[in-house]
Image (tube, rainbow, N blue to C red):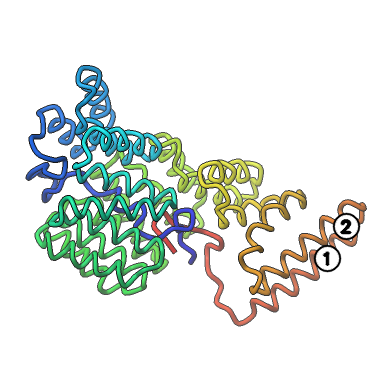
Amino acid sequence: MRRFPIFIMVFIVWLIQLMPSSAGIGGTVKNLDFLGPNVDSTSQKAWALIEEYKYDEAIKLCDEAIKTDPSNAKLYVCRARVYDRKGDLDSSIKDCDKAIELDPKIPMAFYCRGMALDSRQKHDAALNDLNQAIELKPDWSWGFMGRGRLYCSIDKYNLAIEDFNKAVELDPKDALPYIARAIYYSSVKEYDKAFNDVQKALQINPNEPAAYTARAYAYNMKQNYSMARKDLTKAIELDPNNFHIYAERAYAFLGSGEFSKAIEDCNKALEMSPMSENAFYYRGYAYSQMKEYRKAIDDFSRVLELIPKDKMTLNARSWCYEKSGRYKEALQDFREVATSQKENPRVMLHFLKLNSLVFLHDYKYPLIIIAIIIVFNILKSKANSGKRKQKPDNLRSPYGK
């Protein structure tokens, strides 16, 4: 099954955002030195609210505090972290910029901005920020987890596993490094190692929602959607305000063909985060399978507003345009896909088909159009013969390929 590389990114892109915001174990804040020295009481309270998943309360507290203390960099970092958890990456980056301007020695500011930039595919800038976070606090496992995620985004898996192992070494009694490494193992299909790391995380903290989400990710990769849904439902019970979990459960529903339930989860995710590319993509995919192509096109278009020229989304929207008889739009979208896959005979065959359909449609040859579709479908069927069908097709996950 094709998993959702976040706008062709990799598996950990969103899971690290699922993790609690403290550096402690089991939801207990041991210290906040990643915010720098002398953390004020308001920032401590804001961080505690984040830890309890009370994001709206945390933002309200930060907003009010910043009005009276606009030079407090730690408050901007706290608010940036909340925006990050809510999926508002632009606001998170803006607050991190302000925090770094006020105080360039806060590790969490560079970490949050690096994570957001990575999600926006600005990998070089993200790497600079994460390196800076590690330089400022070399004993902080989060810096290595974040950089490991980035290395996965750019397919440097050898460097990624080194960073995940380093994170585990630094915090062997913290559940989160095991969870991050478990997602890595799932992405490279080393499922036994992934399940082993999740089990270690749950032994440390049985109520860690990210652990259940990580195991669900592995189950989804193995196409065991019923077990994935079970774990994700448990994660939602523990963290009901995390839209990423609803997005991953939507993926599980899509995998088992339960499109209406997938749409419900996507709607819930979008209530929490109106800019969730994952939720828009999944809902669009569900609509496309229900032959509601207009709604699907609208959702895929929203993804492309947020992640321009994402080839997987262009391919999905092209398919919906084609099914709707809008061949020019289908060709325009698919041209972007074909440009990067000129060596793929199936891609070029489909590109030729769309060009033919556009030409014939312009000259009003409906019977020939039908014949062309039949011929190309036969050729495609022969090209696919002997290959294992992956279901659902053209589907991606919040975490990766």
Q: Please indicate whether residue 201 sits to the left or right of residue 361 in the image.
A: left
Q: Please provide percent x and percent y for residue 116.
A: 36, 46
Instruction: Report the mark closest to the observer, 2 or 1.
Output: 2
Q: Residue at x 61, y 41 (%)?
A: 298
Q: Which quadrant is home to the C terminus?
A: bottom left
Q: Please provide percent x and percent y for residue 321.
A: 70, 50
Q: Please indicate whether residue 299 sits to the left or right of residue 94 in the image.
A: right
The residue tagged 2 is 360
Q: Residue at x 25, y 18 (%)?
A: 67
Q: Which mark is residue 1?
A: none
- Give the mark nearer the N terminus: 2 vs 1: 2
Q: Please provide percent x and percent y for residue 205.
A: 13, 54
Residue type for callout 1:
Ile
Q: Residue at x 23, y 29 (%)?
A: 58
Helix, strand or loop at mark 2: helix
Q: Please provide percent x and percent y for residue 324.
A: 73, 49
User: Quadrant of residue 69 in the image?
Assistant: top left
Q: Are marks 2 and 1 in contact (CB under 8 Å)?
A: yes
The residue tagged 1 is 372
Cα–Cα gap, marks 2 and 1: 9 Å
Number of on-image labels = 2
Q: Residue at x 49, y 64 (%)?
A: 2
Up/down of 387 relative to 157, above or below = below
Residue type for callout 2:
Leu
